[in-house]
Amino acid sequence: MPSTRIRAALAALAVSAVISSGALAGCSVSRDDEPNASASEPTRTPTPTATEEPTAQPSATVTVTASPEPSTSPTTGGPAPTPAAALLSAAELPQLNPTSRWTERRTGPAGQQPFGLCQKFDLLTIGAESVVERTFASGTSTAGQQVAVFPDAQNAVRASKVAEAWQRDCAKRVKRTGLEVDPISDVAVPRGKAWWYLASFQRGNDGHFHALGLVLSGPRLSLLRMDHDGQDHNYPAGQDPIQLAVKAVSARLG
């Protein structure tokens, strides 16, 4: 595993072209917790059969500058929580429905695979110093959470902008992949920033639904994802499981 200094330098070289080309210009569309803030969200139906799954292609990355991680929490003044402390347990992760309970599958250092349908690189590649991951299962449904620590808050913000750019690029590939990607929706949190979006495609007789959320607080960033098959993905406004998960993580990210 390369040192933090080497990894940061590699990340900086990888992203300079993207940053200078303006790939990250423009932030996500600011919306309420749910589209239109209606009493209930319209039933989401999947798009026509996908001819291929989305593939990861090199795109937006971030420029990383080395600086020490704060030893105290910016909000409490006490010791900064460890990344693992922000991982939700199976009991804390919101369920997809009242009868489908999550069970924990694995907790440990994150690998080098992209996390999420639209992600193109892992968080270490775009500048994180360390990343821990926990995965879950409930029948055929899966979920996961990653918590990453960046050199400083500025680099964490840049990484969040990269994730937004990946979502926009993912949405542009609808005709080629059969993937439908909703716009990013902001989530109100006490501190930092949070958002989520939903993507879907046809899988056999059902649709496959993929929800991804992001929470940003200081030099820490957490990604959450939930995947399930079904006829629709329909929850009351503000009650989508990924939204509830994002809020729960924000309260403990530190």
Image (cartoon, rainbow, N blue to C red):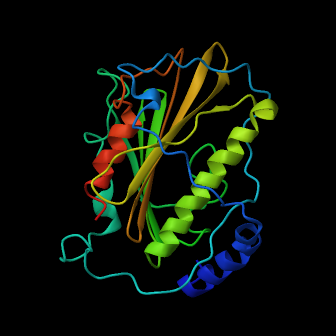
Residue occupying image coordinates x 39% and y 44%: 187
Residue 124: in sight, yes or no? yes
Kindly indicate the quadrant of the structure image that contains residue 23: bottom right
> Which quarter of the rendered picture does the C terminus lie within?
bottom left
Residue 114 left/right relative to 133: right
**From what the image shows, is residue 36 above or below residue 27?**
above
Give the camera-side residue of 140 and 69: 69
Give the camera-side residue of 42 and 64: 42
Residue 118, horizontal then vertical, whole percent: 64, 46
Residue occupying image coordinates x 47% and y 79%: 151
Residue 202, horizontal then vertical, whole percent: 67, 22
Residue occupying image coordinates x 67% and y 17%: 204
Give the camera-side residue of 67 and 91: 67
The number of discs equals: 0
Residue 123, horizontal then vertical, whole percent: 55, 63
Residue 93, horizontal then vertical, whole percent: 31, 40
Kindly indicate the quadrant of the structure image that contains residue 49: top right
Kindly indicate the quadrant of the structure image that contains residue 82: bottom left
**From what the image shows, is residue 57 above or below residue 157?**
above
Residue 111: in sight, yes or no? no
Residue occupying image coordinates x 55% and y 67%: 158
Residue 186 left/right relative to 200: left
Residue 134 left/right relative to 82: right
> Which quarter of the rendered picture does the N terminus lie within?
bottom right
